Amino acid sequence: MARVCALTGTKVRYGNNVSHSHRVTHRRFEPNLQKVRLQSEALGVAVPMNISTRALRTVQKKGGLDGFLMTTADAKLQPEALRLKNKIRRKLMGR
């Protein structure tokens, strides 16, 4: 399983552990991913996805999954989230 947020694309970053003697060893900074089921009011289904806790906070702030997707620019979304956004947009337009 890839360690990537399904909404924002937050992924593993790399850095160094630096000891007191300045000996450097490589390390990974992994995102805090959680498996959640977010409810889409427009589609009427719960969508399971792996998202970071930061993205989860933003989703709650924007009023749910639909609010988050509709207010976020397409360039900032992952392909899976973009497909979901287009489904919601079509449903809201009445198609």
Image (spheres, rainbow, N blue to C red):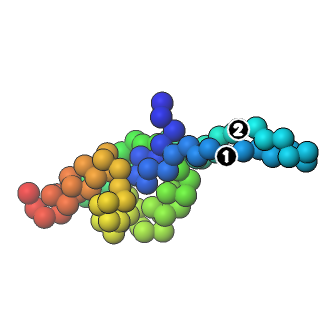
Q: Residues within 10 Å of mark 2 (few under 14, many from 20)?
A: few
* Place of residue 83 in the rendered image (x, y in percent of width and height, measured from the top left): 25, 49
* Residue at x 41%, y 67% (from the top left corner): 63
Residue 1 percent coordinates (x, y): 48, 30
Quadrant of the image occupied by residue 77: bottom left
Q: Residue at x 35, y 65 (%)?
A: 72
Residue on which disc 2 sits:
26
> How many badges with numbers are in the image?
2
Asked if one can make out residue 2 in the rendered structure from this viewpoint, the answer is yes
* Residue type highlighted by circle 2: His
Q: How crowded is mark 1: few (under 14 residues within 10 Å), some or many (20 or more)?
A: few
Q: Residue at x 69, y 39 (%)?
A: 27
Which image quarter is the C terminus in? bottom left
Report x, y in % for residue 8: 43, 54
Q: Nearer the viewer, residue 83 or 67?
A: 83
Residue 19 sits in quarter: top right
Label 1 SS = strand
Q: How far apart are marks 2 and 1 (CA)?
A: 6 Å
Front-lying residue, 34 or 45: 34
Q: Is residue 54 left or right of residue 15?
A: left
Relative to 84, is 5 on the left or the right? Answer: right
Mark sitting on residue 83 = none
| Contact (Cβ within 8 Å) of mark 2 with mark 1 | yes
Q: Residue at x 70, y 38 (%)?
A: 26
Q: Which mark is residue 15?
A: 1
